[in-house]
Amino acid sequence: MPEFVFAIIGVVVGIALGFVLARYLVNASAKRKEEEAESILNDANRQAETIKREAEVEAKDTALKMKAEIESERKERQREVREAEHRVQQREESLDRRTNSLDQREHQISSLQGQVESRQRKVEEAEQEVNRRLESVAGMSPEQAKTELLNNLKDEVAHESAAIIRDSEMRTKAEADKTARSILSQAMQRIASEHTIENTVSTIQIPSDDLKGRIIGREGRNIRSFEQITGTNLIIDDTPECVTISCFDPVRREIGRVTMESLISDGRIHPARIEEMFQKAEKLVNQRVQEAGEQAAFDTGIHDMHPELVHTLGRLRYRTSYGQNVLNHSLEVAYLTGIMASELGLDPVIAKRAGLLHDIGKAIDREVEGNHAVIGADLARRFGESDAIVHAIEAHHNDIEPNSVLDVLVQAADAVSAARPGARKETLDAYIKRLEKLEEIAMSYEGVERTYAIQAGREVRVMVEPEKVDEAKTVVLAHDIANRIENELQYPGQVKVVVIRESRAIGIAK
């Protein structure tokens, strides 16, 4: 029992000692931490004091710098203000000088104005005196004198104006004619193309007359098949070693010619072979037509034409007019029109386009009724050509009145191309006789003084005597002459009859 008590006491004493020891240790640690905190606080205070001193120093430096900058800016502003004040002072002095000068000039002007008014009064008095003397000498009042003077001036001005107008008209016409001749001559010289008379080939040479029988066939079946398939007339007569193909359509006639040449070359002539060769010939000719149209468009620099127009243009390769190949004629008209348009400062591309298409109606005028100019204009309009091009096509033979420079250029180029020697199949003698006949018909009417056939026979100008033919009769005379020419002569295109009646008043100064 006592041991148990001692054990308990020992435990209690141990606990007490442990508590005391733990408390001591805690107190020691707290004291140490307090010392460390105090040390850290002291260090922080020292650093803060250092930073504060540095900040104060830096603030002082910054304040000094700002003060220096402000002082410098203030001095600069003061300098600018002084300079501005100086400039203002100079301007004020200049204004003062100008004011003094203006005052002096105003004084001088006032003095001069008084002198002018005085002189003006003297001049008016002198004019009144002169007028009184003139009235007394002339015996007319001022109003009467003004009227007389104005009448005389009107007569003189009218005569001088008429003379000036006549001189201007003559000079203008002379210069215009000279310029027109120069442009036409330059255009023709720059073209310098060859002119050969072309005819659509309708006569085919055969190796021997024995072949004619094979072409005709038994009871004429081959010739009938050929005519039915090709749509042409095959003429076999006594002409040795040749046959003739006739058709109003030049393209169809060309297809027939190629078909017959292929049959002769092949040697086998019967209906089935004729049909086979016709299909090949048709394809070949259509290809040539397309190539001819494309080449013509390429040569003239036109690349946006409707394909149908290109194909129709190529058909002109096999179309002739008075022996002249129409496609070659159209190309030449395009070149001439383009050159003349360039000389006049117009668009040569549009001019070439109008010249190239001006005769396109001849490609289908055997299939469509009407004048080829009207047919061509309708065709161009249907395939999207501009109004200017359509009008130029329709007006190139005066079916409608020309209303633009382009219309006149196409007419001139068409006339130049058609009227060149060798361009059309007409001998010089026949050409001269036709012109003489035109003048002879016009001269046969009463009151006609002179006649002139111009523009390669496309126009007849009739000068009448004004005493015998009045204005109303000129219309009837033009109509009668045109009807007689139409009934008695054969000519290409149209012939325009122009009757000119001129009245003249002649005065002689002696």
Image (tube, helix red, strand yellow):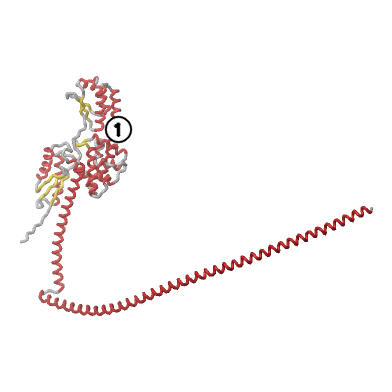
Q: Residues within 10 Å of mark 1 (few under 14, many from 20)?
A: some
Left or right, 382 with reference to 45:
left
- Residue at the far left: name it: 510
Q: Along the line of sight, which residue is nearer the eye, 481 or 279?
A: 279
Q: Which residue is mark 1?
A: 287
How many numbered marks have been drawn onto this rendered protein structure?
1
Above or below, 341 relative to 104: above
Whole-percent x, y for residue 249 in the image: 24, 33
- Residue under the image location 66 percent in, 64 percent down: 44
Above or below, 107 relative to 505: below
Above or below, 230 relative to 477: above
At numbered mark 1, what does the secondary structure look like: helix, strand or loop?
Answer: helix
Q: Quadrant of residue 440?
A: top left
Q: Quadrant of residue 216?
A: top left
Left or right, 492 with reference to 7:
left
Whole-percent x, y for residue 373 in the image: 24, 41
The amino acid type, in three-letter code, at marker 1 is Gln
Note whether residue 507 is visible: yes
Whole-percent x, y for residue 387 in the image: 29, 46
Q: Along the line of sight, which residue is nearer the eye, 253 or 199?
A: 199
- Residue under the image location 78 percent in, 59 percent down: 26
Q: Along the line of sight, which residue is nearer the eye, 47 or 210?
A: 47
Whole-percent x, y for residue 104 in the image: 29, 79
* Screen quadrant of the C terminus: bottom left
Note whether residue 312 is visible: no
- Residue under the image location 20 percent in, 34 percent down: 198
Q: Quadrant of residue 297?
A: top left
- Residue under the image location 20 percent in, 28 percent down: 203
Left or right, 127 with reference to 34:
left
Above or below, 452 relative to 87: above
